[in-house]
Image (cartoon, rainbow, N blue to C red):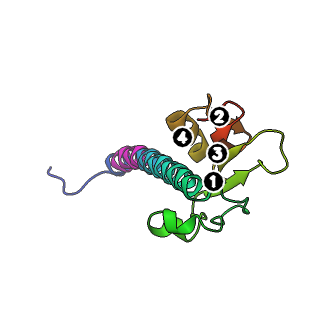
Amino acid sequence: MTRKGFTLVELMTVIVVLSILAGIAVMKYIDLRNAALAAQVASDIHAVRVGAFNFFADQETWPAESSAGTVPIGLGPLLPGQLATTFDRVDYMLDYDNFGPGAPQIMIGVAITTSDPRLMAKFITTLGSQAPFFVAGNRLTYLIAGPGGIM
């Protein structure tokens, strides 16, 4: 007797195998996306660092403190593209910190915050957690200038 079609067991086996492969693909996609965002963060930090040094070279002072997600006054023209208008990204936020005026020593840094713990773990893996990077909770700070001078 010849049969046409598939049995229920065969169909269920195919569905299980496809769902496992789809799960693996989704996890790989999330990891690749986080790796791309970590590379973008590294690029953003480098741009802010170079912009702050250029500002210091022109003004002989560091840019003033600004709130999280806000570009410091005067630093915008020294930054490329969208970074010149806002530090607020969809997946993370940059925060320029200037502790110099009230602090005993100059401390300039850029902090990255995100609400996604996997993304923060990828940032730490990519950028590091040793000086000049410092980690506190969901905040990774890159020190541009500190107690020892320029980093």
Q: Nearer the viewer, mark 4 or mark 1?
A: 1
Q: Secondary structure at mark 1?
A: loop
Disc 4 residue type?
A: Lys
Which residue carries the number 4 mark?
122
Q: Residues within 10 Å of mark 4 (few under 14, many from 20)?
A: some
The label number, if any, that marks residue 149 in the structure image? 2
Reply yes or no: does residue 20 show up in magenta.
yes
The label number, if any, that marks residue 117 in the structure image? 3
Task: Please report whichever mark, 2 or 3, sits nearer to the chain's N-terminal start.
Answer: 3
Residue situated in front as seen by the camera: 74 or 142? 74
Disc 3 residue type?
A: Pro
Q: CA distance from mark 4 to mark 1?
A: 36 Å
Q: Are marks 1 and 3 in contact (CB under 8 Å)?
A: no
Residue 53 locus on image (x, y percent): 55, 50
Q: CA distance from mark 1 to mark 2?
A: 15 Å
Q: Check the image and report above or below for 27 versus 80.
A: above
Q: Check the image and report above or below for 64 versus 16.
A: below
